[in-house]
Amino acid sequence: MIIKSYEVNKINPEIHNLLLFYGKNEGLKNHITKNIVKNTNNIHNYDEKEVLDNENVFIDNLLTKSLFDEKKLIIIKRSTDKILKIIESLKSEKLEDITIIINADNLEKKSKLRSFFEKNKETICIAFYPDNDQTLSKLAYDFLKNKKISISQSSINLIINKCNGDREALYNELNKIDLYTQNGKKITTEDIMKITNLIENHSVSELVDNCLAKNNKKIINILNENNFNNEDCMLIARSLLNKSKRILHLVKEFQNNKNIELTISSAKPPIFWKDKEITKQQIKYWRPENIKDLIYKLTDIELLIKKNVNNSINLITDFILEQSSTKSNN
């Protein structure tokens, strides 16, 4: 059953045990999830790959109950159509005091997972589209007013533009400003640019762009010239993942209109003039199926980096060199 993100009051916990949250607005997803589960602390987070690799163990743990168990919330992140078989099997089970939230990125209309949740009356399907600038501006205004922090509208607009329609990213940046201004410390536009990462890490940005453009020699130079540390590795992986998702959208647009200039000029958010040429290279290079495969591999790399922090530099370096040295996908 399809409902809107503002219609969560329609969710009946006694009936609706299976919920699908898909889309890029992680902040709104988290906000609604907290409202759904405010009466339980028994929360279990999984990644889809963990569930698929240990399917029997997952189902046994899920369905095993004790007399002292409180209501259980299961959240399966980074979900795709691959999880559908397990969800179908769970639908026939008695899921008493269990709520399962399937958290997915954008799902196309042809997605079998999305179709399953949309068509069943006992399941809930909610699309989480990016917040528009007006909504984010209101959220920022309310936050700053509550904290009695004064910054210019132009600075607020810069932060909003950087957040790509995600209120969670917005709150992360606003919390940095709140922390900086504690004890009455004044904050300048320059301070805001620094603490909210509005001044880009050009070495990371260049590395990501050249990886997606398969500029192997340039990548080797960037790696040699920059002394990346373990903390940088997660930033690189996430930047590469976010840029790959955007390139996937642009590649699909290019396949539809066959006009690279139109694809670039109509992109939203707009592509900065200095990035247009390398973006053209990336669009022409990739096919949707290849970049989808890259995106899936990147989710695995993120997990590996989290589990092997001390080896994260080798993991991300090897991955980038492998991707940049492969032959063209066209």
Image (spheres, helix red, strand yellow):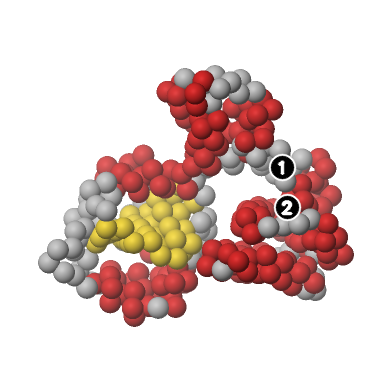
Snapshot quadrant of residue 146:
top left
- Could one spot residue 245 in this view of the protein? no
Q: How many marks?
A: 2
Q: Could you tell me residue 28's position as x and y percent?
A: 43, 43
Q: Nearer the viewer, residue 218 or 87?
A: 218
Q: Residue furthest front?
A: 183
Dot 1 falls on a residue whose secondary structure is loop
Give the position of the C terminus as an image quadrant: bottom right
Residue 200's label in the rendered image is: 1
Amino acid under disc 1: Glu
Point 67% across, 65% down: residue: 313
**Residue 210 vertical placement versus 168 (above, below):** below
Residue 8 is left or right of residue 145, and the answer is: left
Point 36% across, 45% down: residue: 32
Snapshot quadrant of residue 1:
bottom left
Q: Could you tell me residue 156's position as x and y percent?
A: 59, 27
Point 42% across, 47% down: residue: 29
**Residue 237 vertical placement versus 36 (above, below):** below
Amino acid under disc 2: Val
Q: CA distance from mark 2 to mark 1?
A: 8 Å
Residue 270's label in the rendered image is: none
Q: Could you tell me residue 294's position as x and y percent?
A: 65, 67
Badge 2 crowding class, 10 Å Cα cut-off, few under 14, some 14 to 19, many 20 or more, is many
Q: Nearer the viewer, residue 305 or 240?
A: 305
Circle 2/circle 1 CB separation < 8 Å: yes
**Residue 153 vertical placement versus 279 (above, below):** above
Badge 1 crowding class, 10 Å Cα cut-off, few under 14, some 14 to 19, many 20 or more, is few
Residue bearing mark 2: 204
Point 33% across, 78% down: residue: 57
